[in-house]
Image (cartoon, helix red, strand yellow):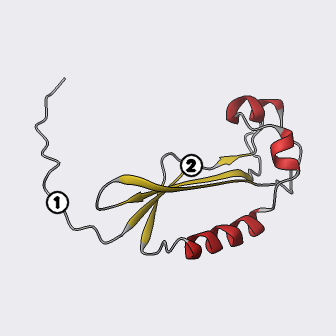
Amino acid sequence: VRETNMDFTHKVYQPFKYYLVLDVEATCEEKFPVYQNEIIEFPIVVIDSSTLTVIKEFQLYLKPTINPILSDFCTKLTGITQDKVENAITLKEGLTKFDTWLKENNIDNFAFVTDGPWD
């Protein structure tokens, strides 16, 4: 293990006012390598880039339209149950709702931050 002396007090110019951390969940099947995934959860954490503090959160469950019934594997992997997506809105409706939420909360000048190949 190598020790690193990092000084986080030095401020660096950030071109974005906010970071929007996005970690979607999607439909999935365990034994099908070719499977059309659909986003079923759209969660966002908004971080102020100057203070690195969480200032807002947004979360929606979304209704899958291609494969509307979640597999047991998907529920076990994501923790999202069928009842959460059955009465949810579609991805298109969800993106419209998210856009409205951004405007209502004056969140502009942002960059999305994700982790992993699926996000």
For the residue labelled by badge 1, is the local secondary structure a helix, a strand or a loop? Answer: loop
119 up-or-down from 29: above or below: below
Estimate the x, y position of residue 40 in percent, counting from the top left: 74, 50
Residue at 57 percent of width and 76 percent of height: 103
Residue 30 seen by the camera: no
State the mark number for residue 45: none
**Label 1, label 2: how far apart the Cα atoms are:** 27 Å
Q: Residue furthest top?
A: 1
Q: Residues within 10 Å of mark 2 (few under 14, many from 20)?
A: some
Q: Is residue 83 shown left or right of residue 57?
A: right
- Point out the tag, 1 or 2, that comes first from the N-terminus: 1
104 up-or-down from 25: above or below: below
80 up-or-down from 54: above or below: above
Residue for badge 1: 11
Front residue of 2 and 24: 24
Residue 6 seen by the camera: yes
Q: Quadrant of the N terminus?
A: top left
Q: Is residue 106 shown left or right of residue 79?
A: left
Residue for badge 2: 23
Q: Is residue 22 shown left or right of residue 38?
A: left
Estimate the x, y position of residue 50 in percent, counting from the top left: 29, 62
For the residue labelled by badge 2, is the local secondary structure a helix, a strand or a loop? Answer: loop
> Which label sits in the foreground, 1 or 2?
1
Identified by mark 1, the residue type is Lys
